[in-house]
Each structure stands twice: as C-alpha cells, then as structure tokens.
Amino acid sequence: MARIGIWIASEDSENLESEDFYFWLRDLIYEKNKISDEVFIFGLANRNDNFKSYLNELNENTRGINFCTVPDNSKFELEVKKLHWRIFRVFEIVRDAHRFLFLIKWALERLISFFDNLSLRSWPRRLVSSVNRSKLDCLIVPDVFLTEWFGTKCPVKLWERRSAISATALNDAKLRRSFNMYSAILVGGHQMAESLKQISKRPNSVKYAPPSKSSKTKAKLESAHSVIQRSLEKEYNRNGNFYYPDLNLINIPYLVCTIRDRGQDNVKNLIRAFEDLIRNKRINCKLIFTAELDVSSRNLVADLGLLFDVLWIKEMHPLAVEMCIQFSKCLVIPSRSFEDGLASWFKASYYGVPACVADSKSLQQKNGTEDIRSVVFNAESVQSISNSLKYAILNREQACLGQEQFINANYDENWENYRLQVIGS
Amino acid sequence: MKIGVFIPIHFPGGTLRLGKNIAKMLNHSLSKNVNTPVKVIFGNPNSAYSLHEDLKDLLNEGIEVVDFRWKKISQLEARQLCQQMGRDADLKMDQYVVPSGGTSDFKDLDYWLFITDRIFDIFIPIKRSGIIVTDYIQRYVPGIFDINDQRHYQAVPHRLIRNTRNADEAFALSPGTQGDLKVFAGCTEGTLLPLVVDDDFMQVKLGAASAAVEKKNQFVWVTNTTQHKNHINTLNGLIEYYRHGGKLDCVVTGVQTDAFDPKWQGTSEGDAHLPYQKQIREMIAGNPELSSRIKIRGHVSDDKYIEELSQSYFLLHSVIADNGTYSIIEAARLGIPAVSSRYPQQEYICELFGIKPVFFDPFDSKDLAKSLLSAQAGDFFSAINMEKIEKRLWKNMANEFCRDFISAVKEDKPRKKLYG
C-alpha cells in the first residue's frame, strides 16, 4: 500500500485549529479503510498533540500513524515572527496612508521578503527533510496557503476546503509557481474549481472534491457527556465562573454556533435574536458558542442580562464541538460566507440537526435554495433570525428534510470517490 | 422523621402562603407515605413573621415554629464542615452561611426544605436539602437584579443558582418554571411537584362573599413594586382603556404599592428616590385619567383584600413572568373573573384549575386595553368550575404532594460536589 503523508504544519494556525480540519483529517484516515498502512503526519508540536488527543478521545487505533513533529516554540522563531508581524503592520499603514513613500514601501517589502525567507529556514526545512527521508508515494496538503512544504521531493496533492476564496486572491506569482509542483488540485466547491481552472495551465488537473461526511461515529459518542464536561471544566478553570463545571449540557436544549476566533460577523444580531426567542417567543433554550466571543459581543451578552443563557467555551476540543452539534436543537451559521461553517453544517445534517444559515450571494447561487428557505435568515434583521430559529426548533423534521435535499443537490455524497482520488487509485 | 421548612428571608406575600401550605401538607400526610411519624418544623427567618397573625394557622395544625437566622462562617469553617460530611467541595468565596436556631442549629432534622432560592450567600447544606424554586423572573426581566452582578461570578445571581445546584434536590411547581430550572439554572434533575392552593384564609369570608355583594365600579390590580409586574405597559394599557371608554376605577393593592401613590413621601422602610417607583409615580401623576381613576390601597389585610375583590367586576394580573399567580384562583373562589397576561406558568395554573381568564400579550398595551374593555362588557367570561378548584385545595392534595416529594427525596443518591 502507498505511503501517504499529510502536511498539517503552518504558521497560520487558525484554519488548522478548526473542527473543519480535524473532521477532514479523521475521515481521511479512518473512513472505511485507512488510506494506507503507514500514514505520516507532519506537523508542529502542539498541532500534532491536539490531533493525537483527538484520535485518543475517539478511541481510534493510532497504530501505523507516524507523527513527525518539530517543536514550534523556539525563542528565536517567536522573536522572528514578532518582528516580521510588526514590519508587516508598518507596511500596511504606509501602503494605505502614504502612496508616495515609494522608497519606504520598497524597503519594507524587501524586509518582509527577507523575514519570509528567514522564517522558512527553521522548522519547515526540518519537516521537509523529514518528508524526503520518509520516501512517500504522496504528500497531501490540506490548504492551498500552506507553502512551507515547497522543496519536498514526492508527488504532492492539494485539497482546498476554503471554497469561498476569490480567484483574485489566488492569482499571485507564488501560487502560480506552486501549480507546477503537484499533480492534482482537489477543491471543495464548484466555484473554486472554476476559478482555479481559469488561472491554471493544466485545467484538467483541477478536480472537484466532495465534502467530508463522517460516518460510523455513533458508537463512539457514548462518552459525549464526559467529553463536553471536560471542555466545561477547562473553561471553569480558566474563567472561574462556577456556572460551568457541573453543567449537564447534553440534557439541556441549546442552539450551537461553531464560530471561530475570526469571522464573528453577525454574531451580535444572533444574540439579540436569541433574546427575542427566549424572552418574547418563550422558546426555552441556551445559546452555546464553541469559541470565545469578541469583547463587544461579550459586553452585549452582559448588557442584555444573558450571561446564564449565552455561554462560550474558549478552548473546545474538535470532538467536543462535534458532540455539541450532535446534541443541539439547531446549528446556527451566521457568517457572511456560509461555507465558513460548511463542515459543521455537514455534521449537523449527518446527525439530523437542523441548521439556520445567513443568506448571502454565494448561498443564492447554489441549487435547491427553495428547500431551505424557512431556515435561511437575513442577518441584518433580528426578527428574521429569531423566526428562522423558531421554525427550525419547532419543525425539526421538515427543516432537516429541506437541508438534506439542499446538501444532496450541491455536494457529492460519494466520499469514497474522493478518497480514491486522493490516494490515486 | 423530622423535616424543616424554611423561608430564607422575610417575604410577606405569596411565598409565605406557599411555605405555610407546604408545611401543612407535609405535616398532614407525609407520615402516611413514610410509615413513620413525621414532625414538621417551620423556620421563621429573623422572627419576621408574627406568630399570632401570620403563622397562627401553622400553630393550629400543630406545627412547631422555630426562629432562625443565617449564621456566617468563613471559608475555612465551610471546608471543615464539608470534610466532616465527606463532601467534595471547590470553595472560593470568603464567606458562607448555615441556618442557625433552636437548640441544635437544625442538625437534628433529617431534611431541610427551603421555599424559594433567595438565599443570598452560598449556604453549606449540612443536612440533606432541597430548594423549591418559585420562579426565575430574572431570566425574563433582568433588571430586577443589578444587571452588572451577572458579570461577577461571586455576586448574588450566581449564588442563587449555585445554591440550587448544590442542593440535593430542586423542585418546581409548574412545567414552565421546571424548564427554567433545567435550562437557566442548569438543574437538569429538577422535579415537578403538584401545584396546590391554600385558601384557608378565605374560608370565613367565602360564605359572606357568595351572598350578593354590591359591586362598585372598579376592578382590582394586584401587584407589587418590582419591575416584572410590568407597570409601564399596564399603565399604558390603562391610558388606552380610559381613552376608549373604560368606565371602571382601578384599585391597586399589594406589597409596598403605596410607593406608587404620587403623594407618597417615603417611609422608614421605603426609599422615595428609587428611580423605578418614582417613574411610576410620575407616570400616574402626569396623566389626569390615571391620577383620577387609579385608587392605591397599598398592602391590605386578607379581610380587606377579600372585601375589595368581592366588590370588583374582575381582577387584573399583568406580569411579564413569574410562577403564575394564585390571586386568579382566589378571585375565582369568590366568583370573580380575571384578565391576565399570557405566559406559560399562568396558562398552566388556569388550565389546572379550570379557569378561563381573558388573556392578553403582556408586551402589548393595546391588547391589554382591548381585554379590559371586553371584561368590562362582561361577555367573555365562562362559568368558573368550583369543583375543579376544590380538588386542588391543600387538604385534598396533601397526600399526592407528599408522595411525589418523598419519591424524589428517598432515593439514596450520592451527594454532589459543592461549588461556590
């Protein structure tokens, strides 16, 4: 069987910390048959540790999975990153505010480029040589922006899940250069595929990859309560709020919003709509965020006197996120781009949990939007959000049916096809 | 078996009535359910209730009344107590409380039952304990507590919830409040007990009241001065009502309602500068219809209340949220219909007792005015089913109540870890 490597190292940690990523990776390794007898996961220490603990929580057999790890906390690297970031901030200010400071801009660009190179010299180099020593048949890179793997000497396959990226964002020299280095580009949405085909010299190499649909996990969810409980206890140890530690969340009706640290647009209106839902519409439930809210949203929750009804858990294990979705009354995806919450939406659909989604142009371009009309809300209108939440809670079956039809109309269910594409069989 | 029923702090209205009602039912029927003699002790907080007026019916039933106060203890003492009890505890506050009174500080009792969760410090449940939560008004009207207190994890709103979660059992008296207990307070094992009415205080008057009483051109609005009673919307509804031909005076009665009288200057117990009360006074004073048609009686005796109610065409109940009011049942006992705001707990009570008030949306003052006009016309009321009400009087329900209570308590559950 093929020796497959998966590259999860990146300086930009946010995408890789998301539940989306973990769902994908787990499915890749365990769906039906493992993709290979030996899987090599190349990552930074804390990222690999997180993934390992995620697999352990699931009681997965990790035999045959080799974690190739480099530490990511060296003092030198941190200092380089800080300096790099400061220069970049200055560059942004200069770029926006002083158009005619050509020389300064030029000097800053050179400096940034120097630091780019410098930051690529330490841990990525070590990981690249580790890839080369492993004699892989294929290296899978799950994000189009992970470029530290340049220099590996094996076939590379890229899978891009962030299908909401615009073509212009991809149209830069670095990316064009990287096209030559892998044999196929697998993307998560038709739009993204079209965009890539336009800029790639080999449009046939751009393939559409259906989203991951995790299966056969029900048996492993018996410990759901304890998994969520651990997140709540961790939160209690962090914030000292003794509302959290013994909260039996899976026995309480709640709505869940799997936002991440960024992209918390429309969250405030969701909070206001939730207030309307419990105080005026008298729907008895909580609202759970699986990440920390930003300061202004936290203040809004406090000002509305909702601190016992709206909870957020700063560090939530991906498995706990999955459990939270499974036991919720409804998933809410309030962000401007619904595809930011696509992985959670698939999870919800899998578990028969209805989802309410903010309306957007990208959503309107999909097939079968009629099927989900009652659960799509105008994110600018508190009443619209609260009405669609109410509908989803009170008409669970209909809402789920509509969402299943919508997902089937837009996303290929055949995960196995995608898996075969990835391993090249 | 010895069981203590405690009202944590002095409440003059419905909470006292509920506490006495439960003490009487336990005293009356618990022994049959546990096959052993039962002694019920009623805890009188800081001797606040008068034995000869407020608690005379308990004494008549043979219930012992014992004065108690909340004794403050340090964190170290609290930890020692928990250690003695063998209870795991994560204690972070500087100060805790335990009930103190009698000869043994109630340690000789088998069970402590608290009526309402209004225990404003974290208490250490030395004995097996239960709390009957009356409502979670703060969830719907957050302004009844200082809203900033929610931000401080050791402040009162957190302590109330923590005490309820720390107790061995938590009880509610309506499915709506049980839902709040579960979702808002996080007590997923909260038990529902039967809702029972105690109208002993009305018995003497019932005969007289059933005789033809001459009606005055009035209805009674039973309220108090806290915000969940929805005064602003109600006053706006009354303005609409009078503007559209309302003919009846509104008689306001209830605890501290004197503070709504525009001429009120404050008393040693009441501060005339409380902004909310001032706002209501100004609202009444600023509208000629309201100032001439609203008659504020304040907190009146049971006899006076029954007299006012009997002379009225109907009763008005207009809160945003609570556990539902018994005043509608009391009115029904006198044959007086009601106009009531619609919320789950009140709907439950009305359904249970077979009462059909004119319901209105508590947030819609026009809907209230419309309902008052309908009630004034008198054509919306259906007959009151006295038989259904009498079935739920405490003496008829005591056995069922005690059976449900003891089945929730007798389980030999492991005691929970204490937080606070």
Image: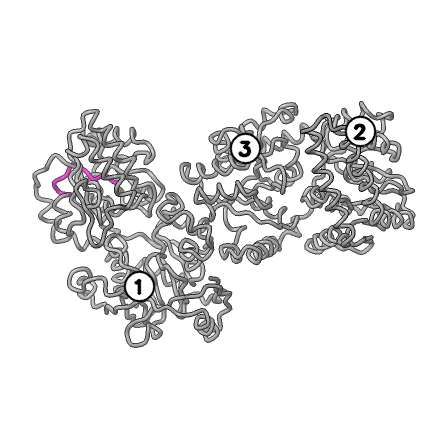
Magenta segment boundaries in residue numbering: B309-317
Q: CA distance from mark 3 to mark 2?
A: 45 Å
Residue identifier under label 3? A398
Q: Specify the label residue A172 is tagged with.
A: 2
Q: Which of the two residues, A236 or B375, is positioned nearer the viewer here?
A: A236
Pinpoint residue B315: horizontal percent, then vertical percent: 20, 40
The chain identifier of the residue carrying mark 3 reads A
State whether residue B175 appears in this view: no
* Comes first in the chain, label 3 or label 2: 2
Circle 1 or circle 2, nearest the eye: 2
- Say which element carries label 3: helix
Pinpoint residue A77: horizontal percent, then vertical percent: 78, 50
Residue identifier under label 1? B6
Q: CA distance from mark 3 to mark 1?
A: 49 Å
- Say which element carries label 1: strand
Question: For this view, does B162 lie left or right of residue A165?
Answer: left
The chain identifier of the residue carrying mark 1 reads B
Pinpoint residue A310: horizontal percent, then vertical percent: 50, 45
Contact between labelled residues 2 and 1, with CB atoms less than 8 Å apart: no
Quarter that holds the N terminus of chain B: bottom left
Total marks in image: 3
